[in-house]
Image: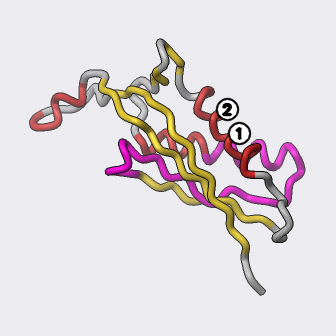
């Protein structure tokens, strides 16, 4: 038996901060800008377009908007870390999946800052 996984990627310019930062990381205590890249992996039960990529990307953007505020073209995520944002997105997507009685499951979410550093959360 094989498992079929699909992956969707989106990006959004935004800001966040780490209010408790200190020492060499003190600059992170202030709001700073990144391009956040989000990669979502989902299990699908068959290989005939169980989930359409465009619809999945729209769901990811909807989750991002639940956890931030769009201000002047930047999504402001406040003090959320990449780990926290990835967790919130994964929980939200899986909740949506079960509400729709889908047999698919979102397996992981990766949130990256500028394509350099990233956090991954797995279900």
Spatial CA distance of label 1 from label 2 is 5 Å
Q: Verify CB contact (< 8 Å) between mark 1 and mark 2.
A: yes
The residue singled out by tag 1 in the image is 59
Relative to 121, residue 71 above or below? above
Quadrant assignment for the N terminus: bottom right
Magenta stretch bounds: 90-118
Question: How far across and how far down the image is residue 25, in percent?
Answer: 17, 36
Residue at image coords 30%, 30%: 18
The kind of secondary structure element at disc 1 is helix
Q: Which residue is nearer to you in this view: 58 or 94?
A: 58
**105 lies left or right of 76:** right
Q: Could you tell whether 97 is left or right of 14 in the image?
A: right
| Residue at left offset 82%, top offset 49% | 98
Quarter of the image where the C terminus is located: bottom right
Residue marked by disc 2? 62
Q: Nearer the viewer, residue 13 or 106?
A: 13
Where does the image place residue 43, in percent across and percent down from the top left? Answer: 72, 65
């Amino acid at each position: 038996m094989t498992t079929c996984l699909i992956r969707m990627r989106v990006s959004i310019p935004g800001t966040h901060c780490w209010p408790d930062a200190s020492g060499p990381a003190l600059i992170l205590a202030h709001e700073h800008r990144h391009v956040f890249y989000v990669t979502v992996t989902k299990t699908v039960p068959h290989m005939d377009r169980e989930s359409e990529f465009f619809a999945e990307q729209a769901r990811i953007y909807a989750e991002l908007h639940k956890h931030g505020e769009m201000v002047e073209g930047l999504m402001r995520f406040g003090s959320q870390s990449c780990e926290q944002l990835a967790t919130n997105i994964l929980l939200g997507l899986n909740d949506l999946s079960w509400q729709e009685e889908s047999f698919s499951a979102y397996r992981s979410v990766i949130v990256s800052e500028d394509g350099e550093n990233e956090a991954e959360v797995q279900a």
